[in-house]
Amino acid sequence: MFQVQHTVISDDVATFRFACDLQRCKGGCCVVGEAGAPVTHNELPVLNKAWNRLKDDMRPRAQQVVRAEGLIRNGYRAPELNCTDGEECVFVTYEEGGVAVCGIQKAWHEGRFDWMKPLSCHLFPVRVMKVGSRDYLNVEYVPSLCSTGCERGCNEEIFLSDYLEDALTRAYGEAWYLEFRNACEEVRERNGVVV
């Protein structure tokens, strides 16, 4: 473990090689799992806005679920986005080849919405657990979801810490990320990870 400002970080975040391979994994992290994506209370207003603005783009079953059960459900530690029948996030849309994508992110790329997606989705496979005033960052490795990303990260020599630069900067700011990047280099050197 190492610490950067108010965050305590697993060494795996620095040493893990990973880069999403969406064409191979088919967006599995938006579809597979026991729960919906964790969201913060601060994200709830923008998620409701996203649903109201984008719901006509969403799958009919997702619309039924949200009408019947709501957009958000109470999770174990935090609110979660609802899922359809224990599978896809309600915001999932499918592209050519059966690739699941986030409808919010798709609208953001198209300039139709001004927010990218929940931070927990942007950070995946890193998960954040808040304890008091500290955030604890760990890698949530799910072989059925992450193995193709691991292969790509190894083949292209991409560290997870670099792959998530935009997401981590969004979460903690540029100054934090620069300190984090330097700390990752020290962790890799300490653990004998070949760069």
Image (cartoon, rainbow, N blue to C red):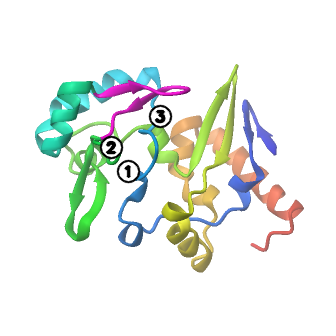
Disc 2 on helix, strand or loop?
Answer: loop
Tell me if 113 is positioned left or right of 151 in this view.
left
Is residue 79 shown in magenta?
yes
Task: Say which element carries label 3.
Answer: loop
Residue sitting farthest toward the front: 85
Q: Position of residue 106 (x, y in %)?
A: 25, 50
Q: Nearer the viewer, residue 112 or 105?
A: 105
Residue 77 seen in the current view = yes
Q: Earlier in the sequence, mark 2 or mark 3?
A: 3
Q: Residue at x 30, y 57 (%)?
A: 100
Q: Quadrant of the C terminus?
A: bottom right
What's the mark number on residue 42? none
Task: Kindly indicate whether the residue at mark 3 contacts the one at mark 2 (C-beta within 8 angstroms).
Answer: no
Considering only order in the chain, which callout, 1 or 3, is on the residue closer to the N terminus? 1
Q: Of marks 2 and 1, which one's residue comes earlier in the chain?
A: 1
Residue 108 x, y percent position in the rendering? 27, 45
Q: Which residues are magenta?
A: 71-83
Dot 1 amino acid type:
Cys
The residue carrying mark 2 is: 89
CA gap, disc 2 to disc 1?
Answer: 6 Å
**Quadrant the N terminus occupies:** top right
Q: Nearer the viewer, residue 133 or 173?
A: 133
**Pick the front one: 27 or 152:** 27
Q: Measure how far apart labels 3 and 1 are at the Cα level.
A: 12 Å
Q: Would residue 49 be found to the left or right of residue 152 on screen? A: left
The residue lying toward the viewer, choosing from 69 and 167, is 69
Residue 38: give its label: 3
> What amino acid type should be assigned to the residue bearing mark 3?
Pro
